[in-house]
Amino acid sequence: MRYSGFRVIAEALTGHKGWKPVWRDPAPQPEYDYIIIGGGGHGLATAYYLAKEFGQARIAVLEKGYLGGGNVGRNTTIIRSNYLLDGNEPFYEFSLKLWEGLEQDFNYNAMVSQRGIINLIHTDAQRDAFTRRGNAMRLHGADAELLSREQVRQMYPWLNFDNARFPIKGALMQRRGGTVRHDAVAWGYARGADLRGVDLIQNCEVTGMRIENGRIKGVETTRGFIGAKKVGVAVAGSSSKVMAYAGMRLPIESHVLQAFVSEGLKPLIDGVMTFGAGHFYVSQSDKGGLVFGGDIDGYNSYAQRGNLPVIEDVAEGGMALMPAIGRVRLLRTWGGIMDMSMDGSPFIDKTPVEGLYFNGGWCYGGFKATPASGWCFAHLMARDEPHKTATAYRLDRFLKGRMIDEKGQGAQPNLH
Amino acid sequence: MIIHHPILGPRDAQEFVYLGDAALMNRPDGMTAGIEEFHDWLYNRDNPAGEHQELWYHEQGDRSWLVVTRNTVTHEITKVELARDVARSKGRSK
Ligand SMILES: Cc1cc2nc3c(=O)[nH]c(=O)nc-3n(C[C@H](O)[C@H](O)[C@H](O)COP(=O)(O)OP(=O)(O)OC[C@H]3O[C@@H](n4cnc5c(N)ncnc54)[C@H](O)[C@@H]3O)c2cc1C
């Protein structure tokens, strides 16, 4: 079923009786050419592009819960391509370009909103660093602008410009950054993949891998063994657990990141704002809620819920920047499990097991990567060579001394 | 989370800095280990869902290093030892 304005009007006039389930609920086949483990954004995008762009068939996505129940439905929906390093920036810019055409491509309203993102500047050193970052972005074809203090004041006059510790001195802005309706991304890719014959199999947890003579033969699941020629793993926070079935240890720790949404307010912030120095970032949803977050809790966790000290830290950051929100009530908080890598950058790579591919290490920033991650992972799996924007995301980069460490923190995942 | 410090009693986890898996205490011998072994020690992790032994540093307290046994699924802490004692029990001098 294709969606269009005409269709919405026709359904409205006929009592909305014509809408059908958006995807099938197939039973698993005994064997596939491609199995993708994980029905989050990255897994679904991989299946979609494998079918659509790389002409592959006999594809299944195996999801242990329901589609989109993981981080793709828990994030704060920010998209941007404001990275510094060569290994990252072309990839994230490729992703932003795919976002710009995504809704037409998969015929689904994902509410892609390029409302602009600013990163606040508080010191001369920070302005130098952001100037360099902006230049790096522009060298790779992305957009970046340096805003003065007065320009920021025009946008958001109610910010606390004269905080004693972090006075606002300006900002780095990417106008093409913004937000996207996260659930709709999962649903749009799922529908697009299903329409092209991909089997989306829910309530199907992978519990083991069958590997013979160094080659993948298939996966053990809660719904029995399923054979496959190629298996791609895209399970975000569960990466270490699933790759352990293939005997691999990863340069990854799982950490919890929390997010927050306030009660609905009148329009206050029309873009996205990050206050890195204060561990706080914020945007406003179309329903009016302030959507905000801060740092990861900082200890290994698979709990999908965090603790109060970080809630306090985030609230303090918010108050330091926006004293006006002091009486706003919090509606909800939740957590998701981040696959934090040792340099803060991801992996899209083959593994020592033939036919087994790995996609992970997305840390707290993998939502914006969803389209490019799916595209590049599909490219790698279909052609057995990396896409040109994802050549640096190798699993052996620490051994080779080719880390992609945007923050220069070293092998300390809770600092990235 | 409350960490029951062996010397100072119950302390809020906020007073501590988290380093990671306590296996980081077992650094390979720099004179004999090869690059692969060092790489594995520094970069790779078991990252279990369940019981995890980990290093916490009491920065806002007595600055001791602790080995905390904690469940990563429930956040329940079941054992807290001085890292010094753990190292000595493995035959190290400190
Ligand atoms: C609070 C929060 C805020 C965030 N904010 C942003 C942001 O503003 N911008 C941004 O770019 N990124 C953000 N992120 C990060 C982003 O959400 C993730 O990096 C990204 O969603 C991970 O990829 P995914 O969508 O494929 O993961 P997921 O949606 O988690 O998909 C993985 C799937 O694998 C499944 N799975 C796991 N184990 C198995 C198994 N054994 N068998 C079968 N299936 C299995 C899981 O059930 C899950 O559905 C945020 C994350 C959180 C938690």
Image (cartoon, coloured by chain):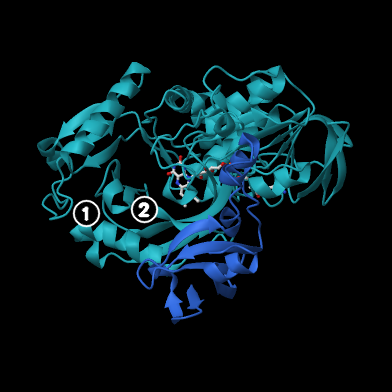
Residue A359: image quadrant is top right
Single out the mark in the foreground, 1 or 2: 1
Quick one: label 2, few (<14), some, or many (20+) residues within 10 Å? many
Q: CA distance from mark 1 to mark 2?
A: 12 Å
| Chain shown in cyan | A
Relative to A82, say whether A290 is above or below.
below
**Callout 1 amino acid:** Leu
Kindly identify the residue that appears in the image at 60 percent across and 44 percent down: A236
Of the 4 image quadrants, the one containing the N terminus of chain A is top right
**Where's residue A129, x and y in %?**
26, 33
Q: Is residue A13 visible?
A: no
Kindly identify the residue that appears in the image at 40 percent across and 53 percent down: A295
**Where's residue A53, x and y in %?**
64, 18
Q: Regarding mark 2 in the picture, which secondary structure is present there?
A: strand
Q: Nearer the viewer, residue A183 or A241?
A: A241
| Residue A292: image tag | 2
Kindly identify the residue that appears in the image at 18 percent across and 44 percent down: A122
| Chain shown in blue | B
Q: Is residue A288 left or right of residue A226?
A: left
| Residue A321: image tag | 1
**Where's residue A103, x and y in %?**
50, 29
In this rendering, the count of numbered labels is 2
Q: Is residue B12 visible?
A: yes
Q: Regarding mark 1 in the picture, which secondary structure is present there?
A: helix
Q: Is residue A258 left or right of residue A376?
A: left
**Callout 2 amino acid:** Phe
**Where's residue A296, x and y in %?**
44, 54
Q: Nearer the N terminus, badge 1 or badge 2?
A: 2
The chain letter for the residue carrying disc 2 is A
Residue A393: image quadrant is top right
Q: Nearer the viewer, residue A103 or A355?
A: A355
